[in-house]
Image: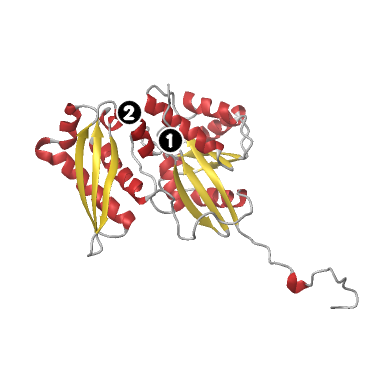
Amino acid sequence: MSDTQSPDEPSAGDIAPVDPRRCGFVAILGATNVGKSTLLNALVGVKVSIVSHKVQTTRVPIRGIALHGDSQIVFIDTPGIFNPKRRLDRAMVDAAWGGAEDADVVVLVIDAQRGVDDDAVKIIEKLKIARMPRVVVLNKVDRIEEKKRLLALTKHIDGLLTFDRLFMVSALDGTGVADLKAYLADAVAPGPWHYAEDDVTDVPLRMLASEVTRERIYHWLHEELPYSTTVETTSWKALKDGSARIEQTIYVERDSQKSIVLGKGGATIKKISMEARRGIEDIADHPVHLFLFVKVRENWGSDPERYREMGLPFPKS
């Protein structure tokens, strides 16, 4: 101890090093089909959320985990916010706003081609009372040839609500994604990480597998039929050779829908199964043997058990 050091004063060697880590939750909000899931996958660097050109693809909040420097960012990909008409619609919208309420930062995604439509205006109105930092992302800017349109859109948004930052990105080709990620890494608060360094999502593998199959259903089926289906992974057995036997059930509401999912001579279900198997192998990192079954469950959209399986709240009215 030096002659000038107090007995109670810690020496330089006793001072704990400052933990440089940061961690926080970032909710990705927006109307349907504005590219939220594509943006999440781009920010995380791997595919953790299914993507489709059809609206209302995402049904439950999906968490994707990304690292940037000393920061761990937990992204919440929420269902698209729209005017709900069915019970399932209401559950999806409730889940979206629930994800926003739990976040430290909110990112509003707007399709630069569509501009600020009625759904976007309603979201902005609700965000006016949000106390967390708010960021707006103009997505799909690669499709806008006249940059004056982007300037006008920026002014329009600024007139509705002052956001902390605005980013112009293309989630599809990666333009602007790195800048957005770096900003969010600095925006989350100091603190320990919530997940392991190599985690990219906290969604159970069984649920991810169901989502992969549902994505292929959206690809191959049309009109309203995809919205009348749900997928559950009912069995997952590890085999001695390192592969897995997976059984999934596709639930539809009517016999006529079952016939469409199966296709003539089982052609459609075979295509869905083949592509889903490859997708599941990518996320499971080992071979899988996928067996799909199609069952009719009338009014599954009013069955609380189905909502529990999907991780959604069940609207009582």
Q: Is residue 192 visible?
A: yes
The image quadrant that residue 125 belongs to is top right
Helix, strand or loop for disc 2: helix
Identity of the residue drawn at 28% across and 26% down: 299
Helix, strand or loop for disc 1: loop
The circle on residue 106 is none
Amino acid at dot 2: Gly
Q: Quadrant of the N terminus?
A: bottom right
Q: Which residue is mark 2?
A: 301
Amino acid at dot 1: Pro
Residue 12 appears left or right of 188: right
Q: Which residue is mark 1?
A: 79
- Identity of the residue furthest to the front in this view: 305
Q: Is residue 19 above or below residue 55?
A: below
Nearer the observer, disc 1 or disc 2?
A: 2
C-alpha gap between disc 1 and disc 2 = 16 Å
Q: Is residue 190 above or below residue 256?
A: below
In x, y percent, where is residue 113? 44, 33
- Identity of the residue furthest to the left in this view: 265
Q: Quadrant of the C terminus?
A: top left
In x, y percent, where is residue 205? 35, 51
Task: Tell which circle, 1 or 2, labels the residue nearer the N-terminal end.
Answer: 1
The image quadrant that residue 39 belongs to is top left
Residue 224 appears left or right of 271: right
Structural crowding at the residue carrying mark 1, measured as other residues with C-alpha within 10 Å and reported as few (<14), some (14–19) or many (≥20): many
Residue closer to the observer: 296 or 143: 296
Identity of the residue drawn at 51% across and 49% down: 74
Residue closer to the observer: 107 or 303: 303
In x, y percent, where is residue 10? 79, 69
Residue 67 appears left or right of 277: right
In x, y percent, where is residue 53? 33, 36
Residue 93 appears left or right of 299: right
